[in-house]
Image: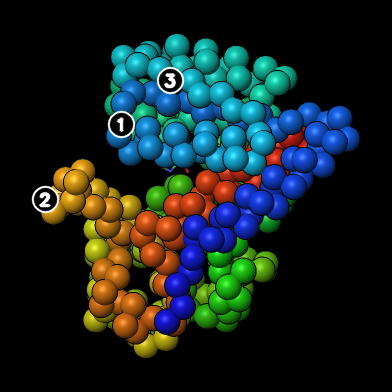
């Protein structure tokens, strides 16, 4: 079994990005600048956004964190987005999800200018992604493609089963893996909460991408020998033996599945760090397009 080490791979990608930033600075070009908008105090979101800002510092990007209270109105958030859209110093920005319930997420994502949408969530960019036109790929699926490619996991002609149809991970992942591209050309089955006989389907998979958000859902009896497993989940599970009172669990039961797997991502240290690295890559691309 080989661990698909997202932490190590992301570090290598960040080094590559840092080198590009050094070159940009040397030639007097603009330093890439990412902004992140965080509404409210969701613990996981605060952790993720903090990690994104820290990663910017590490590679030499400029970053701006805009923290807004839970009570922020939709109109006020749309104003903040409009300011970021028109601020020439900002190359790209993200609005961390989920948003408080009183804010219409679709409306917010559509307000982000597609040229600054480094999350790749705007309908224009989703459309371009689906049509294989150049665009910002959503960071988590993009990170998974990169991990598969760098570890030379064969995807061409393979049966891939994606569990979960979210707009952020499952749906784009299923589209990208089926395309004519590196880490593509797979035969993809997209499964979800209404799928019948899921185990019958996952048992035939050469690659399983688990992105449903249920801790340790995929167990060893659901996969075949030699499978590649990509675990996108990250849930806090109560654990009195831990100092913080919780541990982080993926959507995959690591102990039972890793016995059968040829390749598997750990949680933490698998897909998570890759997501951040690819967000930086998109920001570099956005800055490059602007210069
Ligand atoms: N929430 C969970 N994943 C993501 C992501 O990739 N981008 C944003 N903006 N919010 C998220």
- Pick whichever of labels 3 and 2 is earlier in the sequence: 3
| Discs 3, 1 touching: Cβ within 8 Å | no
Quadrant position of residue 153? bottom right
Quadrant position of residue 97? top left
Q: Position of residue 11 (x, y in %)?
A: 58, 54
Q: CA distance from mark 3 to mark 2?
A: 31 Å
Q: Which mark is residue 42?
A: 1
Q: Quadrant of ligand 1?
A: top left
Q: Position of residue 272 (x, y in %)?
A: 44, 52
Q: Which class describes the residues within 10 Å of circle 3: few (<14), some (14-19), or many (20+)?
A: few
Viewer-proximal residue, 116 or 200? 116
Above or below — where is 105 with respect to 80?
Answer: below
Residue at the disc numbered 2: 240
Q: Position of residue 175 (x, y in %)?
A: 54, 60
- Pick whichever of labels 3 and 1 is earlier in the sequence: 1
Q: CA distance from mark 3 to mark 1?
A: 12 Å
Residue ID at (26%, 74%):
255
Q: Which class describes the residues within 10 Å of circle 1: few (<14), some (14-19), or many (20+)?
A: some
User: In the rendered image, which quarter contains the C terminus?
Assistant: top right
Residue at the disc numbered 3: 67
Q: Provide the secondary structure element on which disc 1 rests.
A: loop
Above or below — where is 60 with respect to 79?
Answer: below
Number of the front mark, 1 or 2: 2
Viewer-proximal residue, 32 or 161? 32
Quadrant position of residue 147? bottom right
Colouring convention used in this rendered image of the protein:
rainbow
Q: Provide the secondary structure element on which disc 3 rests.
A: strand
Q: CA distance from mark 1 to mark 2?
A: 22 Å
Q: Is residue 73 left or right of residue 115?
A: left
Q: How many marks?
A: 3
Residue ID at (45%, 34%):
49
Q: Residue 111: tell me if it is visible.
A: no
């Amino acid at each position: 079994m080989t661990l698909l080490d997202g932490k190590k791979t992301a570090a290598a990608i960040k080094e590559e990005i840092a080198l590009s930033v050094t070159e940009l600075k040397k030639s007097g070009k603009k330093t890439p600048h990412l902004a992140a908008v965080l509404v409210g105090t969701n613990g996981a979101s605060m952790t993720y956004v903090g990690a994104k800002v820290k990663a910017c510092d590490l590679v030499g990007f400029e970053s701006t964190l805009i923290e807004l209270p839970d009570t922020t109105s939709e109109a006020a958030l749309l104003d903040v987005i409009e300011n970021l859209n028109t601020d020439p110093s900002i190359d790209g920005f993200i609005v961390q999800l989920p948003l408080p319930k009183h804010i219409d997420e679709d409306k917010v994502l559509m307000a982000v200018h597609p040229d600054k949408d480094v999350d790749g969530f705007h309908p224009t960019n989703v459309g371009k992604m689906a049509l294989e036109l150049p665009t910002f790929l959503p960071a988590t699926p993009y990170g998974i493609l990169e991990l598969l490619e760098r570890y030379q996991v064969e995807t061409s002609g393979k049966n891939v089963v994606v569990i979960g149809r979210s707009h952020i991970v499952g749906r784009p992942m299923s589209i990208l893996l089926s395309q004519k591209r590196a880490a593509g050309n797979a035969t993809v089955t997209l499964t979800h909460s209404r799928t019948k006989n899921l185990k019958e389907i996952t048992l035939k998979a050469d690659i399983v991408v688990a992105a449903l958000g249920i801790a340790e859902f995929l167990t060893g009896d659901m996969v075949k020998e030699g499978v590649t497993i990509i675990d996108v989940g990250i849930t806090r599970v109560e654990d009195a033996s831990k100092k913080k009172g919780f541990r982080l669990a993926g959507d995959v039961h690591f102990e039972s599945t890793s016995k059968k797997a040829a390749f598997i991502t750990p949680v933490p240290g698998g897909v998570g760090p890759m997501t951040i690295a690819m967000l930086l890559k998109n920001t570099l691309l956005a800055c490059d397009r602007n210069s």
